[in-house]
Image (tube, grey):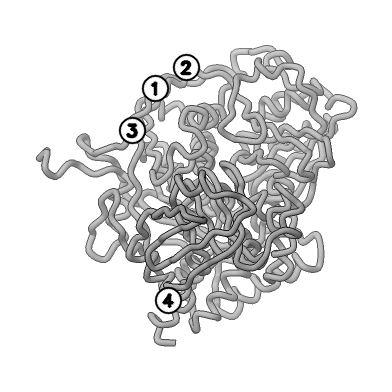
C-alpha cells in the first residue's frame, strides 16, 4: 500500500457513468488489452491516445455510477490509469476498483484543484495527494478496503482465506 | 420503545437475519450470507475466471446460484456465444441447476421473481446493478461486480456496509395512465442521481395497496438510478399472495419498527402524479410528459428488467389496438421472460402489437444496454421503457434516449412524437 503513484492528471466532470467508461457494445470482451482500447470511448475517444501508464484521473461526483460492469475498471487499468481522485464514487464501482487494486481516493478539494496536464503524486500509505507545492489528504479508507488493497485485491485475499 | 435503542428498519432486519451474530445497524460493516447469487452472461464469465484465480474448487451451494444468459442472448456474434458457452459450462461443471438461456428463460431479475426464487426477507447478491428489482418482493437485491461475486461464489458471503434507510411513504392512488415508472421517475427527480447513495429506499404507506407487483418491480428496479445501495417494499397481502402463486417458500414479511431511524422521510402522493419522461442523459431529469409534447422519435423500445412485464405489454396493446405505428417510426417490443411472452400471446396482446407494425423480440437485455437488437444510429432519438438514458447508452454517442412508461412510449409510437397518452387514447373508465 505504500506504492507511490506519479502521473499526469486528466480531468472529467460529474456523473461519469460506466456506460461511457466502457460502452455496452464491448461487454462481450474480457481481456484487458481489448477493453483498454475502448476506455472512456463514450465520452472522449481521444483519451486512449493521451493517457500514459501511471496517470491519474481527477473527477467529480458519483464517478462510475450505473452499470456494475467490472469491465469499466479493467479498461481504466489497462489504459494506464493508476488512481482516481474523486468527489465521490458509486458504491459498486468503488468496490470493483478496490477488488482489482485500483485506488479511488475521495477528496473533493484535490479533485477540484488538480491541474490537468500536469503531474501529480499519490502516497497511498498516508492517502496524500500532491501537485507542485500543494498537498491534500483524502478521506480515510475502511478497514476492509485497506485489507483488500494491502492484499493486492480481492482475489489474493480470498485465496488466503481459502488456504488455496 | 427505548430511545437508547431505536427500532430497526426493514433493511436492518433483513441484513441482521443474514449475519452470523444477528447484528446489523446502519453504518455497520458486516459479513452477509445471501440466499441467492445471480450472474449473467456478461458478469458471469469474468466472475468464473476470478473464481478459478481464487483457487476455489467448488461454489458454496450450487442450488443457490442462478445463471442467466440474457445480455448478449441469443448470441449476436462468436465472442458472445463464447461467453454464454462459458456460463453454460460453469453450470454443468458445478451441477448448478438454475441455468437459463433463450427459450426457457428471460431477463434475470424478472425471471428470478417468476421462478419463486425471491420472497419476503430474502437477500439476493447479483452481478448486475438492477438486482435491486428484488426489493419489490420485500427482499433485498444488492448489486456487485464480478470479482465480488466470485468471492461470494467461493465463500458464500461478502462484506458490506449496512445502508442507511430512506423511508418513502406512499399515499393516494395513481390516476389514469400513471404507472410504477412515473412513481420512480418522480422519486429519482426529487432525490437526484446520487441522493440515495449509501442508503436503502424503503417503500410503504397506504398507497402501497394501489400498486401491483409489476408496478412495484418497475419502481424497485430504478432505485440504483437514485444512487441507492438497494431498496425494499413493505410486505403485504399482495406480496404474500404473489409468493404463493410463484411457489416461493412462505416467509413472514419483514416490517420496520414504528421507531425505526431514517436518514430521510419522503412523502409521495400517488394521486398527484402525472406521466413522466426522463430527458437524456440522466434518469434524474424527469419532467411531465406534457413538457415534451412534439419531440420527434425514431425508435420506440418497450422491454428490459424494469418494464417488460405483462402489465407493460397490456399497456402497449391498450395504446396500439386499432392503431398503426407512425410512418418513419420503428417499435421494438421485448417481453421480459418466455412465460410473459407466452401469456401475452395467449391474451392476444402480441397480435395487437404486431398488427400495429411493431417488431416483437424474444426476451433479451438487447438494446437496453446498447448490446444488440435495436441499436441507435448517430442523431437518432428513442423513447424507451428502460432504466438508463446515459450518453450513447443504446448506441451511437450522438443518439438520445428518453425514459418513460409503456403507455407513454406506445403513444409516441402512434403519434411519431412524444405526447401525453390521452392524446392518442382518450381516458376511459378502464384505462388505468
* 3 and 2 marks in contact (CB < 8 Å): no
- The residue at 53%/76% (across/down) is B51
Mark carried by residue A151? 4
Tell me if I can see residue B134 in this picture.
Answer: no
Q: Is residue B203 left or right of residue B43?
A: left
* Residue B11: image location, x then y, percent: 33, 47
Query: For the residue carrying disc 2, how many other residues have a C-alpha within 10 Å: few (<14), some (14-19), or many (20+)?
Result: some
Rendered position, B69 above or below A151? above
Nearer to me, B432 or A20: A20
* Sequence order check, earlier mark of 2 and 1: 1
Mark carried by residue B171? 1
Secondary structure beneath disc 2?
helix
Q: Tag 1, which chain?
A: B
Secondary structure beneath disc 4?
helix
Question: Where does label 2 land, which residue?
Answer: B271
Which quadrant of the view contains residue B24?
bottom left
Question: Where does label 3 land, which residue?
Answer: B264
Query: For the residue carrying disc 3, how many other residues have a C-alpha within 10 Å: few (<14), some (14-19), or many (20+)?
Result: few
Mark carried by residue B333? none
Evaluate whether label 3 is on the same chain as label 1. yes
* Sequence order check, earlier mark of 3 and 2: 3
- The residue at 59%/73% (across/down) is B91
Amino acid at each position: 500500500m505504500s506504492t507511490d503513484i506519479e502521473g499526469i492528471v486528466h480531468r472529467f466532470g460529474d456523473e461519469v457513468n460506466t456506460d461511457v467508461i466502457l460502452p455496452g457494445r464491448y461487454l462481450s470482451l474480457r481481456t484487458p488489452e481489448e477493453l483498454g482500447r475502448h476506455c472512456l470511448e463514450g465520452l472522449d475517444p481521444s483519451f486512449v491516445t493521451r493517457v500514459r501508464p501511471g496517470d491519474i484521473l481527477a473527477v467529480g461526483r458519483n464517478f462510475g455510477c450505473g452499470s456494475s460492469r467490472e469491465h469499466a475498471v479493467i479498461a481504466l487499468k489497462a489504459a494506464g490509469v493508476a488512481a482516481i481522485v474523486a468527489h465521490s464514487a458509486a458504491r459498486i464501482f468503488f468496490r470493483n476498483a478496490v477488488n482489482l487494486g485500483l485506488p479511488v481516493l475521495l477528496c473533493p478539494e484535490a479533485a477540484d484543484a488538480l491541474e490537468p496536464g500536469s503531474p501529480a503524486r499519490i502516497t497511498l500509505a498516508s492517502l496524500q495527494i500532491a501537485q507542485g507545492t500543494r498537498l491534500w489528504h483524502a478521506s480515510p479508507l475502511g478497514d476492509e478496503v485497506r485489507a483488500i488493497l494491502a492484499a493486492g485485491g480481492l482475489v489474493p485475499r480470498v485465496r488466503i482465506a481459502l488456504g488455496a | 420503545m427505548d430511545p437508547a435503542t431505536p427500532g430497526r428498519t426493514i433493511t436492518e432486519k433483513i441484513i441482521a437475519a443474514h449475519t452470523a451474530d444477528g447484528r446489523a445497524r446502519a453504518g455497520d460493516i458486516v459479513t452477509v450470507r445471501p440466499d441467492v447469487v445471480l450472474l449473467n452472461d456478461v458478469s458471469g464469465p469474468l466472475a468464473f475466471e476470478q473464481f478459478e484465480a481464487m483457487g476455489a474448487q467448488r461454489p458454496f451451494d450450487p442450488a443457490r446460484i442462478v445463471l442467466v444468459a440474457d445480455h448478449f442472448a441469443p448470441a449476436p456474434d462468436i465472442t458472445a456465444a463464447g461467453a454464454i458457452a462459458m456460463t453454460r459450462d460453469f453450470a454443468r461443471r458445478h451441477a448448478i441447476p438454475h441455468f437459463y438461456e433463450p427459450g426457457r428463460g428471460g431477463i434475470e431479475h424478472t425471471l428470478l421473481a417468476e421462478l419463486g426464487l425471491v420472497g419476503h426477507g430474502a437477500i439476493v447478491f447479483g452481478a448486475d446493478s438492477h438486482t435491486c428489482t428484488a426489493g419489490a418482493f420485500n427482499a433485498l437485491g444488492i448489486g456487485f461486480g464480478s470479482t465480488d461475486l466470485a468471492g461470494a461464489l467461493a465463500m458464500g458471503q461478502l462484506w458490506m456496509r449496512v445502508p442507511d434507510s430512506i423511508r418513502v411513504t406512499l399515499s393516494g392512488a395513481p390516476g389514469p395512465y400513471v404507472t410504477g415508472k412515473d412513481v420512480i421517475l418522480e422519486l429519482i427527480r426529487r432525490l437526484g442521481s446520487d441522493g440515495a447513495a449509501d442508503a436503502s429506499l424503503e417503500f410503504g404507506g397506504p398507497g402501497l395497496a394501489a400498486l401491483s407487483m409489476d408496478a412495484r418491480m418497475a419502481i424497485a428496479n430504478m432505485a440504483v438510478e437514485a444512487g441507492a445501495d438497494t431498496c425494499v417494499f413493505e410486505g403485504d397481502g399482495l406480496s404474500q399472495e404473489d409468493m404463493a402463486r410463484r411457489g416461493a417458500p412462505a416467509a413472514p414479511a419483514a416490517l420496520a419498527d414504528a421507531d425505526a431511524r431514517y436518514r430521510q422521510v419522503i412523502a409521495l402522493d400517488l394521486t398527484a402524479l402525472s406521466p413522466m419522461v426522463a430527458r437524456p442523459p440522466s434518469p434524474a431529469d424527469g419532467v411531465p410528459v406534457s413538457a415534451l409534447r412534439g419531440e420527434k422519435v425514431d425508435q420506440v423500445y418497450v422491454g428490459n428488467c424494469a418494464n417488460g412485464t405483462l402489465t407493460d405489454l397490456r399497456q402497449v396493446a391498450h395504446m396500439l389496438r386499432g392503431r398503426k405505428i407512425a410512418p418513419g417510426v420503428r417499435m421494438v417490443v421485448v417481453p421480459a421472460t418466455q412465460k410473459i411472452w407466452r401469456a401475452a400471446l395467449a391474451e392476444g396482446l402480441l397480435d395487437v402489437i404486431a398488427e400495429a407494425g411493431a417488431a416483437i423480440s424474444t426476451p433479451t437485455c438487447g438494446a437496453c444496454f446498447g448490446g444488440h437488437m435495436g441499436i441507435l444510429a448517430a442523431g437518432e432519438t428513442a423513447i424507451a421503457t428502460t432504466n438508463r438514458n446515459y450518453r450513447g447508452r443504446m448506441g451511437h454517442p450522438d443518439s438520445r434516449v428518453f425514459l418513460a412508461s409503456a403507455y407513454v412510449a406506445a403513444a409516441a409510437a402512434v403519434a411519431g412524437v412524444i405526447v401525453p397518452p390521452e392524446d392518442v387514447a382518450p381516458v376511459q373508465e378502464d384505462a388505468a
